[in-house]
Image (tube, grey):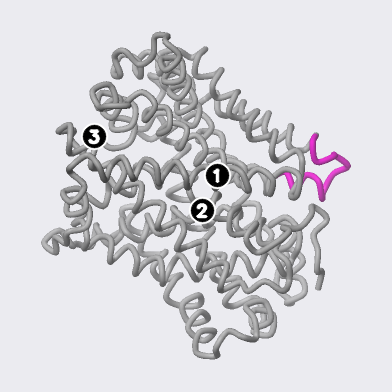
Amino acid sequence: MQTTSIHGMWSSRLAFIMAATGSAVGLGNIWRFPYITSENGGGAFVLIYLFCILIVGMPIMFSEIVIGRRGRMSPINSLRELAADAGASKSWMGLGVLGVIAGFLVLSFYSVVAGWTLHYGFLYAKELAGGVGVTDPTANFTGLLASAGEMTFWHGVFMVMTVGVVAFGVEKGLERAVSVLMPVLFVLLLVLLGYGMNTGHFQEAVGFLFKPDWSQVSGGMIVTAMGQAFFTLSLGMCAIMTYGAYLPSGVSVPRVGTTVVIADTLVAVVAGLAIFPIVISFGIDPAGGGPGLIFTSLPLAFAEMPWGIPYGMAFFLLLSVAAWTSSISLMEPATAYLVESTNLSRKTAALCVAGLAWTLGLASVFSFNLWSEVRIGGRDIMSAIEYVANDIMLPIGGLLTAVFAGWILSGKITREELGEKMPNWAYSAWLWLTRVVTPAMILVVLASLLGII
């Protein structure tokens, strides 16, 4: 068993927690969780979501960390070696390939959306300095989507920011970045929460988000909760598996895995409590979720509220930081594999991955303008890429990860990696969930997404 990775190691348990939390916390936490919570029964949805986190998210989180730390290499090579050691087919490395490709696809369009947040942050900074900023939110956003050149520029800026971190390795790049970015993200979130608490509508927001409406509980809502629990933790794309390869041997996997899950969930909840008091204050329709809420509706509120311009700049800075920490983890698995499998240096490997992802991302850029008429399965290009990666590849990756950890790895290995201090009942529960319950629930999600049930 290797005790270190050739790519470097996290210096502490806290470094891993910040990096893995940064990977899990992304744009979806800031707007999607509050939106789908309000549309799916409030507190009823939250309770079901937390239940799904426990029985789907946490077992796979533990599994990815276990596989990564035991293999100490990129997901592809770790799975190949661990499968060979277990006497299983080396074709299990295909799980690593699937995860790396899924992460690469997500990175290609994620960078485009992150570019929008940079663009808006720049506009608010310019307005704060006395220039012309977001004058007409709807026109600003429509104009941005129509401009292939402007979107390409901000897409490129964000990709440069990402590769600038990954190219310098684990200690000097990833760890140094998250040690700064994650505290910034938490501080910004708390500042925005404080503002939301002083709008006079905080209690309404709490009720709006978390008051149970059991009449809305349905099979479709439960599937939505399972999907949110799965996707919000960055599972199935081998990002957590890669970060696990850099985790020191003496660190407790259950402890750090649980901390990451709790931190990710808290960020989503706090984001909702920060955003929805403003939404209620200005009579904004929460059904305008996603881009409609963030890039058109909320800027209208920012223009009217006291200190709205600095608030808007802080809000989009928060989104940019959340996207940045996630994109770093998306680029790392492919970069690590290239370093291990070729003679490329880390900087060259990272530049290759970034260049290819940026190029593929142009398809998403053009899907809003030059290629807006192109449809793939009834979807525009960016939506098609997102559907294949998020809705198909990630659940399959999570399913195979659970099967590999639960059935292929020996009990001796998983017991060692999860720690001797883990109570026998807790280990048995993890094993039962990983082998049976989690795969069954992911199959239900997949069947629902594919229209089978």
Residue 163 drawn above or below residue 78: above
Residue 171 drawn above or below residue 257: above
Of all residues, the one furthest to the left in this rendering is 215
Residue 143 image offset from top left, x and y in percent = 37, 13
Q: Residue at x 76, y 71 (%)?
A: 84
Residue 175 image offset from top left, x and y in percent = 68, 49
Q: Are marks 2 and 1 in contact (CB under 8 Å)?
A: yes
**Amino acid type at mark 2:** Ser
> Which quadrant holds the C terminus?
bottom left
> Which quadrant holds the N terminus?
bottom right
The residue nearer to you, when weighing 26 against 330, is 26
Q: Are marks 2 and 3 in contact (CB under 8 Å)?
A: no
Is 138 situated left or right of 200 in this image? right
**Amino acid type at mark 3:** Gly
> Real-space Cα distance between discs 2 and 1?
8 Å
> Toward which corner of the image does residue 289 lie, by quadrant?
top left
Is 284 situated left or right of 386 in this image? left
> Real-space Cα distance between discs 1 and 3?
24 Å
Q: Which mark is residue 326?
A: 1
Label 1 sits on a secondary structure element that is helix
Q: Is residue 75 magenta?
A: no
The magenta-colored residue range is: 334-347
Q: Can residue 39 be seen here?
A: no
Task: Judge the density around disc 3: few (<14), some (14-19), many (≥20) Cα neighbours within 10 Å.
Answer: few
- Which residue position holds label 2? 234
**Total number of numbered discs in the rendering:** 3
**Amino acid type at mark 1:** Ser
Is 294 situated left or right of 434 in this image? left
Q: Which mark is residue 288?
A: 3
